[in-house]
Image (cartoon, rainbow, N blue to C red):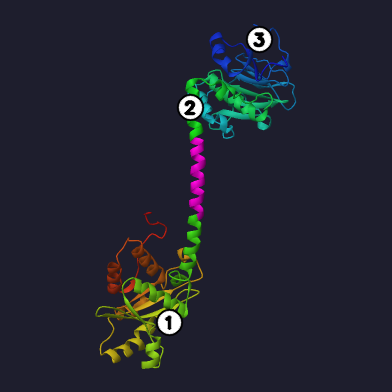
Amino acid sequence: MDDTPRPRILFESVSDELFESLTRYAPTIGRLGHDVPAIHPTDWDLIVSCDSEPEGPSGVNVLSFGGQRFENAKTGTGITAIRQHESHARVVQRDEGCPAEFASLVDRTIVSPAPAPPRDVFGRQPREWFQAIATIGAERAPYAGIMSTYGSALILALPDYVTSHGEWLSAFIDYLRGLQPTRFPAPPDWQRREAWATPDMRVSLGELGAIALERVAALERLATQEVAAKTALDQAAVTAAAGPQRVLTSDGADLVAAVLALLRDLGFTVEDRDDHHDQKTGAKLEDLLVTDGGWACLAEVKGYTKGAKVTDVSQIAGRPSVAYAAEHRRAPDVVWHIVNGWRTKDPSTREKAIPNELDLKPLTSADGCLIDTRDLFRAWRDVQEGRATAEGVREAMRKAITRWSWASDLTTPPTPS
């Protein structure tokens, strides 16, 4: 039989009906006691048996439906797995160590159709020489099904009430194919080749070929688009880092310039007050004068490597407001303390700037508020993306007392145009 195709399956004590349903799973088959009078081990790759004491010659895999006696694979001597222990436990379950390839089959064909107790089961043998497939009772022992190596072969012992014999044979062959590829080779593919395909198959093969070409073209198109998008992202990131994102990273004059630009984008009229104070007052007071029609606001802008300082809160409500009132003969409508706290950290992980509202009382008393540059960036971006209006943002900022915030999802991208 050396030249017969593999796998070579020998059936033992299998009914005629079951035999007919299982013959399609192998190119070489035989029936013990029918066309095969005795077993010669090297002639066969797998024995499928419904016998209570299945044949198990050395080196031949065994799939047993209802077998009761199996030898210890470690020693090869002595009958140590015996399905003659009666169990009255109600629960049958798949073992946690059951190979994933068999999981669905165990649930559908062993666990679900399990008859009422008592049942014959394998006793509590030590697990070091086999893998349980299905177990009995909450203690997960004894066993309804086991798998064990025996020399170079594998034994899969299933209960006699198991269903779907064909599925089990197919699954076991696939499992053995991964372990013994020479004995269980992949099925021949000539039947699916163009040369021997039927007309219907040729139509499907043509469709698959067209899809393959379309996939190649689509992947090439997507690759080109990906390169273009990454290049655009790199360029936009450079522009952002030197522009709007400075409100999240900078301090000093650079931060003031970045805040000024975003406020102007929102429609405010904004004046950098350093030059004004150099000429008019000779003192360093507020950083920005923000106006919107007849409404006026003094803004102090500060960046911090750590949290915003509580001692800086009152500065904008003191001398700057007094100087503005003296110059314009009226107090500013509001004051803003704009802060970029923890500026070296990821903005998503930064703590709330000055979380205690009582520490912001100087701003509240001056009809002003604290503004976190993260909120300013969110609002500016929502306006740029059309999810908010500049007028709406300006109105919210003008009316804010104590603290102004802007609710926006930083992770939601705009809808592509």
Tell me which numbered mark, 2 or 1, is placed earlier along the sequence: 2
**Viewer-side label of 2, 3:** 2
Which residue occupies the foreground of this view, 59 or 264? 264
Camera-side mark, 3 or 1: 3
Q: How many marks?
A: 3
Which range of residues does the magenta coloring cover?
Answer: 211-227
Question: Disc 3 residue type?
Answer: Leu
Which residue is found at the position 56% from the left and 33% from the top? 100
Mark 2 / mark 3, whichever is N-terminal: 3
**Is 295 included in the stretch rendered in magenta?**
no
Q: Which residue is mark 2?
A: 204
Residue type, label 2: Ser
Rendered residue at 54%/19% (across/down): 166
Residue 275 screen position, x and y as percent = 40, 88
Which residue sits furthest left?
Answer: 294
Disc 1: which residue: 311
Query: Considering only vertical position in the picture, is 362 above or below 61?
Result: below
Instruction: Classify mark 3: residues with Cα within 10 Å, few (<14), some (14-19) or many (20+).
Output: some
- Main secondary structure found in the magenta portion: helix
Element assignment for label 3: loop
- Three-letter amino acid code at disc 1? Thr
Quarter of the image for residue 359 reads: bottom left
Residue matched to label 3: 32
Q: Residue at x 46, y 66 (%)?
A: 347
Res 43 seen here: yes
C-alpha gap between disc 3 and disc 1: 95 Å
